[in-house]
Image (spheres, helix red, strand yellow):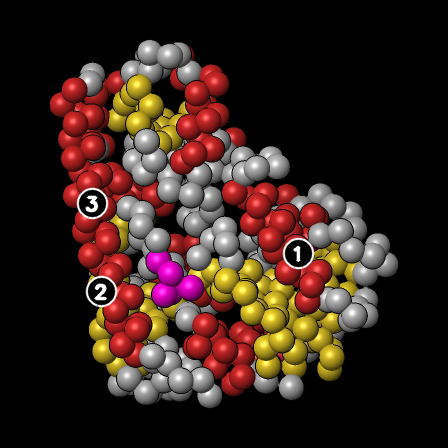
Amino acid sequence: MQIFETVACNLCKSKDYIKMYKSNQYSNSKLGTIEISIVMCNKCNFIFQNPQLTTSALNEHYKNNSSGQVYSLQGPSTRTTKLLRERTKFIKDSLKNINISSICDVGGGKGLLLDNLKINQNIKKFLIEPSNAILECTNPNIIKIKKFVEDIDDNNEKFDFLMCISSLEHFKNPLYILKIFNNLLNENGVLLIEVPNSLKPYKTTAEFFSYEHLNHFTIETILKFLHSAGFYPTKIEESKIAPNIRISANKKDHYINKQKTFSCFDIYKNMKLSLKEKLNSKIVNLIDTNNINNLAIYGAGDHTKFVIESFNLLEYITVFIDSDPKKWGLLYYNKLIIAPNELSSHNIKNILISSYDYEKEIFASLSKIVDKNINIVRLYNT
């Protein structure tokens, strides 16, 4: 099976590009460690992965793997809830003075956003999701469509409001997808797009420019994509909770500062090197001063992959801990994944929290249930 292919810029079709960044990333047991290159088109300045994983390689990857969250505790002050609250406010602001009868979430997983969106009960809610996550949507008022959006029939019901949250970066052909969205919307329909902002990478060991993200948007380039697909923006904001761009647009050229883009990637590369040195000293100290053979890592997800690959910790790990019940009892790097309340059965002396976004919440929850003699190690906050 061919893993990589060279592609042209999806925005302007140019094959003239310059390399911005590269990294070796561990993907899974089938693909192993792969070298990812991020380039910028010299013609339109769109940033994308090139070469990028082929469709068959991506399908093989997603068949056995998930890019879901390591930690998803929900409560009034958690990151997940704050982000949900921010999104619902943006949606309601975008819909002010607009009469709609239907709303659709493309790639909405188990329908969490739709479930929490309190709108007129006469407005029909649709969820388009190709994965089995849709089976976890138990709200009988949400109409579920288990399909890839590319496979939606032209005769399908049109929507008044369509959302695509943190998904466009995964598609091999984002312009084609946006044109599909245009076709799925009524004439006066509104589109909501949310994508990571490539000019706002944050400092974490886990790779911000993940191999699963084929496209890397800035405000300028996502606006160009929307324009090319027949949309014009009506509301734009940058999330205060996550490094994301959020845009609502109706159906109906911005200058891109190339030097600013290059500068951002240079800063990110230096930031990662600095962070790795800092975390390395912390982990070396952990190994040297503790009974490291009784180590548990909290988090069996992408962040942990990078920690293990970067710092060669695997030989010291006894078990992994995760909050997701679906992972309990499974093996990760041939080590058992347990629930947090099983810690006392494994004689654990040290717990390393492997998460950037949810470290504070995990630490707070562990502090309530673990013995005070257990050493809890935080990588980012002290």
Place of residue 100 in the rendered image (x, y in percent of width and height, measured from the top left): 79, 68
Find residue 266 and name its label.
Answer: 2
Task: State whether residue 22 is above or below residue 78.
Answer: below
Please name the predominant secondary structure of the magenta segment in the image: loop
- Picture disc at residue 276: 3
Q: Could you tell me the amino acid type at mark 3?
A: Lys
Amino acid type at mark 2: Asp
Q: Earlier in the sequence, mark 2 or mark 1?
A: 1
Observer able to see residue 98: yes
Q: Nearer the viewer, residue 28 or 182?
A: 182
Q: Is residue 268 above or below residue 55?
A: above
Q: Position of residue 270 (x, y in %)?
A: 20, 57
Q: Quadrant of residue 106?
A: bottom right
Residue type at mark 1 is Lys
User: Which secondary structure lies at badge 1?
Assistant: helix
- Which mark, by number, is residue 89? 1
Image coordinates of residue 336 in percent, x first then y, are 36, 26
| Res. 153 image quadrant | bottom right
Q: Which residues are magenta?
A: 197-201
Look at discs 1 and 3 and give the one toward the viewer: 1
- The image quarter containing residue 187 is bottom right
Q: Earlier in the sequence, mark 2 or mark 3?
A: 2
